[in-house]
């Protein structure tokens, strides 16, 4: 994920915006166009990861024109676009290695190494696409342990479609086959556990009994 650090003019605090300060996110601060100076309106801080131009930019303006824009919200897309180019150039590369490549190839500006104003430096699309960067198979920005692996498995019927040669997943969107505690069952499945049916029936019975008792009570009060 790529996110902007935020703009001073539209913020009541100098704290880096969320989700840019979330571990693992590439937080992008803004530079003055064609310079190595931080844009005066850019929020910076310890969470800053990369910088990109934030002033004298052109943005689309509906219905069919363009206009001058500025802000970290327009710097972040330059980094996101670089990540997209890397992903297109190396389609099998993991997301963590894409992030690592952006950091490793950034142009170091300001104090040597990562700092709170420029992060790792200015994003460098050409270097990100051409430099030999060893794989590390993790996101170097994420200092938290993983909450778990999403393992919902393939959609119901996906295996049958593939076995029948119908091309049920031509774009490769189906998750890898794996054992998981999450399982989907087709509607009308006969594998519903008996205890669940029992307690469901009991809940319905109690609800009906309570409703009948209330009706009888109201009827008696009306007769009086």
Image (cartoon, grey):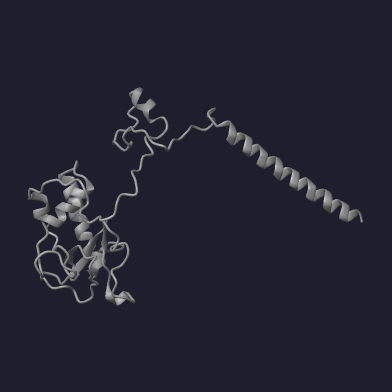
The residue depicted at 11 percent of the width and 50 percent of the height is 129
Question: Residue most toward the front?
Answer: 145
Asked whether 207 or 58 is in front, the reply is: 207
Tell me the quarter of the picture where residue 115 sits.
bottom left
* 83 on left or right of 153: left
In this view, which residue lies farthest toward the top? Answer: 164
What residue is rendered at 8% in x and 54% in y?
A: 127
The quarter in which the C terminus is drawn is bottom right
- Which image quadrant: the N terminus? bottom left
Please say if 99 is above or below 116: above
Count the marks: how many?
0
Q: Nearer the viewer, residue 57 or 52?
A: 52
Looking at this rendering, what residue extends furthest in the right direction? 224
- 82 above or below 118? above
Question: x, y percentage for residue 109?
Answer: 10, 67
Residue drawn at point x = 54 percent, y = 27 percent: 190
Between 166 and 181, the one nearer to me in the picture: 181
Which corner quadrant of the image does residue 199 belong to? top right
Q: Tell me which corner region of the image, top left, top right, bottom left or bottom right, holds residue 105.
A: bottom left
The picture places residue 73, in percent across and down from the top left corner, at 26, 66
Q: In the image, is 168 to the left or to the right of 58?
A: right
Residue at (27% x, 58% y) in the render: 23
Where in the figure is residue 104, as x and y percent of width and height?
Answer: 12, 55
Q: Position of residue 139 (x, y in %)?
A: 22, 51
């Amino acid at each position: 994920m790529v996110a902007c650090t935020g703009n001073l003019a539209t913020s009541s605090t100098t704290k880096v915006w969320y989700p840019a300060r979330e571990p693992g996110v590439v937080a992008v601060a803004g530079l003055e166009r064609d310079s190595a100076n931080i844009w005066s309106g850019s929020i910076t801080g310890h969470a800053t990861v990369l910088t990109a131009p934030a002033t004298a930019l052109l943005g689309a303006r509906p219905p069919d024109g363009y206009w001058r824009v500025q802000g970290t919200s327009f710097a972040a897309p330059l980094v996101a676009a670089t990540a997209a180019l890397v992903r297109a150039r190396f389609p099998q590369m993991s997301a963590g290695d894409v992030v690592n490549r952006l950091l490793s190839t950034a142009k170091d500006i300001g104090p040597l190494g990562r700092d709170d104003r420029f992060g790792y430096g200015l994003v460098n699309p050409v270097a990100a696409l051409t430099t030999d960067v060893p794989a590390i198979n993790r996101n170097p920005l994420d200092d938290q342990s993983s909450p778990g692996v999403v393992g919902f498995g393939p959609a119901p019927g996906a295996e049958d479609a593939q076995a029948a040669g119908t091309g049920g997943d031509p774009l490769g969107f189906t998750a890898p086959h794996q054992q998981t505690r999450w399982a989907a069952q087709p509607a009308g499945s006969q594998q519903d556990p008996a205890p669940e049916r029992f307690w469901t029936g009991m809940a319905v019975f109690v609800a009906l009994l309570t409703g009948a008792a209330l009706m009888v009570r109201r009827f008696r009060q009306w007769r009086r």
